[in-house]
Image: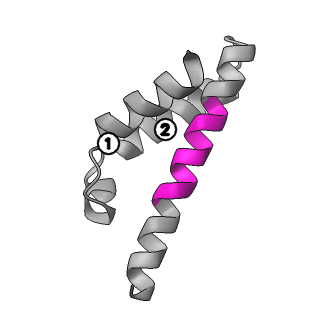
Amino acid sequence: MDPYEKLANAIVLLAAKDYRSALKRLKKTPRNREAKAAASDLERFFRSGWYSALTSVDGEYLIENIRKEVLE
């Protein structure tokens, strides 16, 4: 695996971790503005062209799976 591929994977993994964390905070305190903003920003990232350039994993698929994991 080349360094650029490692970097791309690290970016996607960190975004998924941050999204999971934001959803957990929202589950505990639904009015948390910071968590809402973070979740919204990360959803926008997962739907972006830049995300698509980093990975072949469908962003909508990732969003749905993380939501199911956290909110159920």
- Classify 12 as above or below 16: below
> CA separation, marks 1 and 2?
13 Å
Q: SS class of the residue under badge 1?
A: helix
Task: Name the residue rendered at 31%, 36% in the picture.
Answer: 61
Q: Main secondary structure of the magenta part?
A: helix
Residue that sits furthest to the top in the current view: 30
Quadrant housing residue 30: top right
Residue 17 in magenta stretch:
yes
Residue for badge 2: 41
- Classify 72 as above or below 3: above
- Classify 49 as above or below 9: above
Q: SS class of the residue under badge 2?
A: helix
Residue for badge 1: 59
Q: Which numbered dot is residue 23?
A: none
Q: Position of residue 53 (x, y in %)?
A: 26, 63
Task: Name the residue rendered at 47%, 23% in the picture.
Answer: 68
Residue 14 in magenta stretch:
yes
Q: Check disc 2: other Cα within 10 Å, few if <14, some if 14-19, many if 20+.
A: few
Q: Position of residue 28 (x, y in %)?
A: 74, 15
Q: Amino acid at mark 2?
A: Asp
Q: Position of residue 29 (x, y in %)?
A: 74, 14
Span of residues in magenta: 12-22
